Image: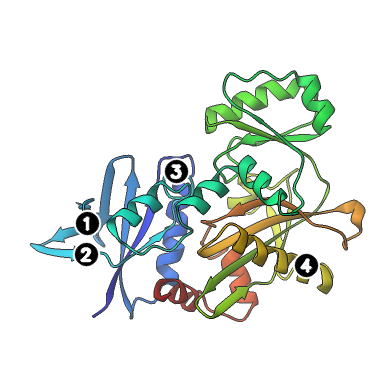
Amino acid sequence: MKKNIAIVAGGDSSEYVVSLKSAEGIRSFMDQERYNVYLVLIRKYDWHVILPDGGKIPVNKDMFGFYERGQYIQFDFAYITIHGTPGENGILQGYFELTGIPYSSCGVLASALTFNKYNCSAFLRSFGIRTTSSILLRKGDVVADEEIVARLGLPLFVKPNEGGSSFGTTKVKTTEQIKPAIRKALEEEGNGVLMESFVEGTEVTCGCYKVKGKEVILPLTEVVPANEFFDYDAKYNGQVEEITPARISGELTRIIQQRTSRIYELIDARGIIRVDYIIPKTLSGDGDPCLLEVNTTPGMTATSFFPQQVCAAGMEMRDVLTDIIED
């Protein structure tokens, strides 16, 4: 019999709409000859299966399934594509651990760690992974703007410590812009503000996944935004040039791929991850890449980085998703 697969999307963050786009991509990639595929939308306590005609049926949260025409349909697997809480920070992973439902992404600890950008950088830095200089500011903390500039320099980035898709992110060029940028970040995702030093260079990203007896480290994508940085418009409105494979040396490509594989092991990842780096301009393309972020629930539209890299590697997304589900 076909397995019943739930593509779990939505969530409670500003990335809700991005999650829906990823869910559409995953549905289009998934082998529907092999699986019964359902879309499950989550928003706070409202969990529904979306039927092909647009109708909604509540999810039975006790066992993660639903009733349709008197028949109970039990999900066999959850493919999590929620960007932000609760799908990227370990909360939903904990639910699936409790209910015994296999799922696609990293476990509770790895998800919680990588969702907190400051803690993740500190953890990986302890293993010799190069990261940007940063300051974490929680609600109620007071740090003088002049001290921030003295430690990080200008320009610098101010962003929510938790969350993605560049929501609430500002490239700050003057001291006077710091406080408005902090307010913006707190309004967007109010769980702390991360301030990072600016590193000029080439931004690249590398996808990776591992299943039993198989390691796949994909070609790198070079990110060339039309704007000042890789903001929301660059990510989702086409204001960027994405080049796969990246225009860097074979040796530097190998270093970044090996580092991505090592990060996968250090955080005890499962499923698909994507790791973002910047290669400092002063290193002329063959120095030590600087870690920007680890994504454990990367975007999965047809034009997202990971599917691009899969295509460049001569692989099919259908086969990748089957690997993840059957592992």
Query: Which is more N-terminal, label 4 or label 1?
Result: 1
Crowd band around label 2 with a 10 angstrom C-alpha radius: few (<14), some (14–19), many (20+): some
Q: Which residue is mark 3?
A: 85
Mark 3 surroundings: few (<14), some (14-19) or many (≥20) residues within 10 A: many
| Nearest the eye: 302 or 160 | 160
Residue drawn at x 77%, y 35% as measured from the top left: 156
Q: CA distance from mark 1 to mark 3?
A: 21 Å
Give the number of the mark in front: 1 or 3.
Answer: 1
Give the residue furthest to the front. 126
The x and y percentages for residue 35 are 32, 75
- Other residues around mark 1 within 10 Å, as few (<14) / some (14–19) / many (≥20): some
Where residue 122 appears, as percent x and y from the top left, is 67, 44
Image side of residue 163 versus residue 229, left or right: left
Q: Which mark is residue 63?
A: 1
Q: Marks 1 and 2, how far apart in space? A: 8 Å
Q: Amino acid at mark 2?
A: Gln
Q: Position of residue 217 (x, y in %)?
A: 64, 72
Q: Amino acid at mark 1?
A: Met
Quarter occupied by residue 248: bottom right
Left or right, 235 with respect to 225, comes to left
Judging by the rendered image, the residue that carries numbered circle 2 is: 74
| N-term-proximal mark, 2 vs 4 | 2
Among the two numbered marks 2 and 3 on one chain, the one whose residue lies closer to the N terminus? 2
Q: Which residue is mark 4?
A: 255
Label count reads 4
Residue shown at 62% from the left, 47% from the top: 120
Residues at marks 1 and 4, CA–CA distance in whole angstroms: 44 Å
Comes first in the chain, label 1 or label 3: 1
